[in-house]
Image: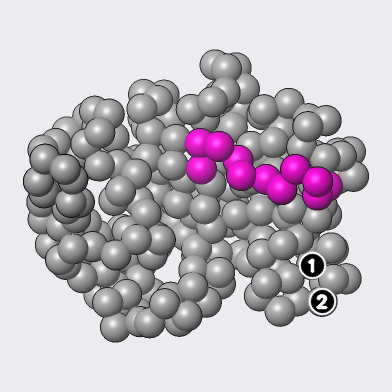
Amino acid sequence: MELDSTGTDTSLIARGIYRSFATAEGTLEVLKGVNLTVSQGEMVAIVGESGVGKSTLLHILGGLDRPTQGDISCRGRQFHLMGENDLSHFRNRHIGFVFQHHYLMDDFTALENVMMPALIAGKTRKEAGNLAEQLLHDVGLKDRINHVPRQMSGGEQQRIAVARALANSPDFVMADEPSGNLDIRTGEMLHGLLRELNDNRSMTMLIATHNVELATSCDRVVKLIDGLASGEENGKVVS
């Protein structure tokens, strides 16, 4: 496995990531050669102005989208060499996603929502159920396992989404504006939960966010400016 400048094992390496989109006005270039190395267990915030490409980069790093140009190596696997089925399988086993909107299934209970990724991965209903129950306990929702989303607050729904992202014990959690739809107090509680999960599980997290508090609680900040990335640590730009 490649090492970063400190000699730490790297979990994810992105090199020369470009992403453009065809529009009625012509080609829109969003990412223009982003390079990024993320170490195992690191919690990294991706920040920048609206429309700069934070979500686009996160989706590419998580294998939800393909770059126009560039290479991504994740756990030693190169995304550009993987077909769609292999990439889908890899995502299910190794990457958990949390979005600004929770995307829970409305007619499923909290338990059933969290069970779903484990069932897709081939676990039995009993295995998936036991795992989901423990995860809901871990995010403070042990008393809500039989409630459907509409019976819960926005913060509770987002915590279910976090538990679902952890269902297959992923190496990575990709969170896209996870507290964007929450009030300040609930958002702070979610930020604390993410930090706790990162600390306790040595789980690598990449978080696209506008929230300054969440960004500064991370180990490192990557700032997107005009399609390129710079890193900041303890308020200083780093290479």
* Residue 173 picture location, percent across and down: 49, 54
In the displayed structure, 161 sits above or below 100; it is: below
Q: Residue at 12% across / 62% down in the picture?
A: 16
Residue 124 is labelled as 2
Dominant SS in magenta: loop
Q: Secondary structure at mark 2?
A: loop
Q: How many marks?
A: 2
Q: Are circles 1 and 2 on residues that touch, CB within 8 Å? A: yes
Q: Is residue 116 left or right of residue 111?
A: left
Q: Is residue 59 left or right of residue 126?
A: left
Region rendered in magenta: 99-109
Q: Residue at 66% across / 75% down in the picture?
A: 121
Q: Residue at 49% across / 68% down in the picture?
A: 91
* Residue 61 picture location, percent across and down: 33, 59
Report the front residue among 72 and 81: 81
Place residue 65 in its image quadrant: bottom left
Amino acid type at image mark 1: Ala
Assess whether residue 108 is covered by the magenta stretch.
yes
The residue indicated by pointer 1 is: 128
Place residue 167 in its image quadrant: bottom right
* Residue 39 picture location, percent across and down: 33, 60
Q: Is residue 19 left or right of residue 121?
A: left
